[in-house]
Image: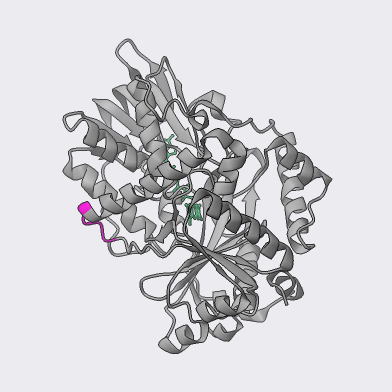
Amino acid sequence: MTAGSARQTIKTDARGLDALRDAEPTPFWLDSSEAPAARPALTGADECDLAIVGAGFTGLWAAVQAKGRDPGSDVVVLDAGRIGGQASGRNGGICEASLTHGVARGAELFPSEAAQLIALGLENLDAIEKSISDGGIDCGWERTGVLDIAGAAWQVEGLREARDHYDRVGIAQEWLDREALRAEIRSTTHEAGLWHHDAAILDPARLAWGLARICAEKGVRFYERTPVTELRRTAAGVGLRTPWGALRARRVVLATNAFRPLLRRLRLHVVPVYDYVLMTEPLTPRQLDAIGWSRRQALADAGYLVHYYRLTQDQRILWGGWDAIYHYGNRIAAELELRPTVHAKLAEHFFATFPQLEGLRFTHRWAGVIDTCSRFCVFWGTALGGRVSYSLGYTGLGVAASRFGAQVALDLVGGTPTELTQLQMVRSQPLPFPPEPLRFALIEVTRRSTEHAELRGGRRNAWLRTLDRCGVGFDS
Ligand SMILES: Cc1cc2nc3c(=O)[nH]c(=O)nc-3n(C[C@H](O)[C@H](O)[C@H](O)COP(=O)(O)OP(=O)(O)OC[C@H]3O[C@@H](n4cnc5c(N)ncnc54)[C@H](O)[C@@H]3O)c2cc1C
């Protein structure tokens, strides 16, 4: 039975619902005694050299790198909520080298610089590892690689193409047929696997908090619970308005991910898409024995709708993905994070993949917003006469790419062209999404068509084929 068909046959699975009964509706990573105390909000007037809006990975890496370039500069980071409180503290913690939402996508979008982007991505991954090690950040970094899993014959074909692609570009990988795959991980839904070694797993909240500690040690100042509501050009730089104060900065980096962009021109370029996640209780040695997985690779389905899953340091399984939900009008709200039907479906799929874990319970369920753009990978730009830059649009693969995004955003706001600012990837922008109500309708059609293709042997309908031809789409 293939993964797709196993998932289809389960209609109302009592195992999944039962296992979810006591799950806390909160992100596992953030539910930790290691969470630092909140920094104060900005009240009154302040000024700095560089203001960074957003304290997720992009904002934090921008602050770390800005201090590395100019230790004497006065850097302030502001966040509407808490440091690492959004996508950066809620994700799967799968840190892949690719800067382009996968190497195949990079080759499609930027054929003339695909090799350079791969090299830059690997360099970026090494730089993350070095910063974690030099900074003594205890975030459970393990360079396990990612094992892409085909659960159906049409996905095996796709994986073979991916393997050839990895070979051509020189990324180390191993092909696992059904037998070899079952020796790694025991699931009846797995048909073949491609294990590529350009990735690590980590605890994302502990990485965010660790980066914030390093920033603070270098003199970066933080304001939490401080939404920036307006940017204004001033004679000496930029004025940032907040509900209880104001900040004057010479330069600004915007790292606001899926949230309403402060620059009006970007409002059609990113849409917030909810991605859902479950965490199990720690597995007993017997349960672990039943599934194998001793080399702890991150796993990801090879189809169009993807589950990603991985082990934690204390032997839980994080299980996320599949549905990606967009709400009319780019709506973001806390109540949208708890969608019982989506969490129940995820739980059903979990037990279809690992039936031998029946009886295992989920301790946490949550969601986070992804900044989807129509090209599926980060883009940049400047505003207010070059005083402001932004890095947005990671579309669900930003744990590693956010460090590169921040590096480019700093180059752009520095005002002097660099090797990176010359890249076509940096100079080009994704096509905007249409305004509502068309946006919602087109995203829904695309989402349903994709689900249909996933469950019907990978056959893409005329609508998806048209989007493919135009090189645009909707993904997570
Ligand atoms: C559920 C989930 C699973 C994921 N899994 C993976 C994965 O396994 N691997 C991977 O590579 N990627 C994954 N991602 C994507 C990855 O987490 C993101 O691409 C990355 O964290 C983006 O970092 P960021 O700093 O740009 O955004 P965020 O972490 O979202 O930070 C943006 C910050 O900006 C703040 N902000 C927004 N507007 C304002 C304003 N006006 N004023 C002040 N502050 C503001 C927000 O409060 C927020 O803290 C996942 C994402 C989600 C949601």
Magenta region: 134-138
Prevalent SS, magenta region: loop
Name the residue nearer the viewer: 424 or 307. Answer: 424
The image shows residue 394 at horizontal and vertical percentages of 51, 43
Looking at the image, the residue that sits furthest to the bottom is 286
Looking at the image, the residue that sits furthest to the top is 235
Residue depicted at 30% across the width and 25% down the height: 247
Q: Is residue 249 left or right of residue 447?
A: left
Looking at the image, the residue that sits furthest to the right is 462
Name which quarter of the figure residue 459 lies in.
Answer: bottom right
The image shows residue 389 at horizontal and vertical percentages of 41, 26
Q: The N terminus appears in which quarter of the rendering?
A: bottom right
Q: Is residue 148 visible?
A: yes
The image shows residue 2 at horizontal and vertical percentages of 71, 73
Residue depicted at 72% across the width and 35% down the height: 470
Name the residue nearer the viewer: 111 or 397. Answer: 111
Name the residue nearer the viewer: 32 or 476. Answer: 476
Judge whether 131 appears above or below 343 on screen: above
Residue depicted at 45% across the width and 77% down the height: 281
How is the protein colored in the picture?
Answer: one colour
Residue depicted at 36% across the width and 24% down the height: 413
